[in-house]
Image (cartoon, rainbow, N blue to C red):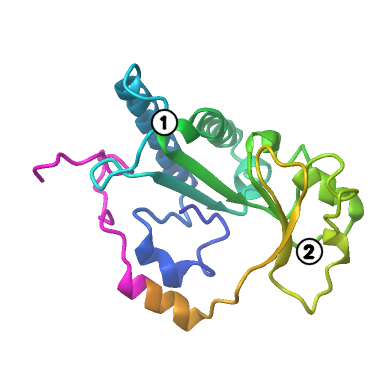
């Protein structure tokens, strides 16, 4: 989990993540580079064996979650880090799905100059938006004409949105359930990440697949 907004909103659930970065942008870039390295290693290992990774307890699916993507792709002042992060995210989004390395990204500003590789996200979810033009920015050209009226969702209906799945033309209206802070803390206590560790300097940021004997 990368939360460049500082971690306040996600801290209660941080035990569920193998890694939780909220302050150090260099550590966030390192984590993404480590995910790319793992993706490439897994690709080489599965070449000639299978075309689709099957998660197992010793070789699990890796999910990289970024809350407020724009802080890393547009607003980060260090241009070197910004380019490094953008490259890693682009590689993960373009190559990672088949080998079980996925990315979930959230942002409030859907413009192309804020998220230049937004077309690499195959599944898109749009909640309430302020302008009609933003609907097509998030869900793709013509999505609003096909019924995704995100700009007409009233404030009184938080959690309502539209989903457009990869390969589908018609958006689907959905509503997410409300999860309280107490619910999140309970989930974190009940389902902590089995891979959560304190990473010393020089150690990998994402757990390597374990041997079956471990």
Tell me the quarter of the picture where residue 136 sits. Answer: top right
136 or 18, which is in the foreground?
136
Residue 128, labelled with which disc? 2
64 or 205, which is in the foreground?
64
Q: Is residue 105 magenta?
A: no
Chain-order first, disc 2 or disc 1:
1
- What residue is rendered at 64% in x and 34% in y? 120
> The residue tagged with tag 1: helix, strand or loop?
loop
Judged from this view, the residue extending furthest toward the bottom is 182
What secondary structure characterizes most of the magenta part?
Answer: loop
> The residue tagged with tag 2: helix, strand or loop?
loop
Crowdedness near tag 1: few (<14), some (14–19) or many (≥20) residues, C-alpha within 10 Å: few
Q: CA distance from mark 2 to mark 1?
A: 35 Å
**With respect to residue 156, does 29 lie above or below?**
above
Residue 105, percent from left and from top: 59, 49
53 with respect to 119 (left or right): left
Residue 52, labelled with which disc? 1
Residue 90, percent from left and from top: 57, 31
- What residue is rendered at 50% in x and 51% in y? 65
Which range is magenta?
A: 188-214
């Amino acid at each position: 989990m990368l939360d460049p907004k500082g971690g306040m909103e996600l801290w209660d659930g941080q035990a569920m993540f193998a890694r939780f970065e909220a302050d150090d942008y260099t550590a966030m870039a390192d984590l993404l580079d480590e995910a790319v390295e793992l993706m490439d290693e897994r690709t080489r290992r599965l070449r000639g064996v299978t075309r689709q990774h099957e998660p197992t307890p010793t070789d699990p699916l890796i999910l990289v979650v970024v809350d407020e993507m724009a802080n890393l792709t547009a607003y980060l002042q260090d241009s070197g880090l910004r380019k490094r992060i953008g490259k890693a995210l682009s590689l993960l989004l373009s190559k990672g799905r088949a080998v079980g390395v996925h990315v979930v990204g959230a942002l409030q500003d859907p413009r192309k100059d804020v998220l230049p590789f937004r077309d690499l996200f195959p599944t898109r979810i749009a909640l309430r938006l302020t302008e009609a033009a933003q609907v097509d920015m998030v869900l793709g050209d013509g999505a609003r004409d096909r019924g995704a009226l995100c700009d007409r969702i009233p404030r009184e209906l938080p959690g309502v949105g539209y989903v457009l799945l990869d390969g589908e033309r018609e958006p689907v209206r959905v509503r997410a359930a409300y999860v309280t802070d107490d619910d999140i803390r309970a989930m974190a206590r009940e389902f902590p990440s089995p891979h959560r560790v304190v990473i010393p300097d020089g150690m990998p940021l994402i757990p390597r697949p374990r041997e079956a004997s471990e």
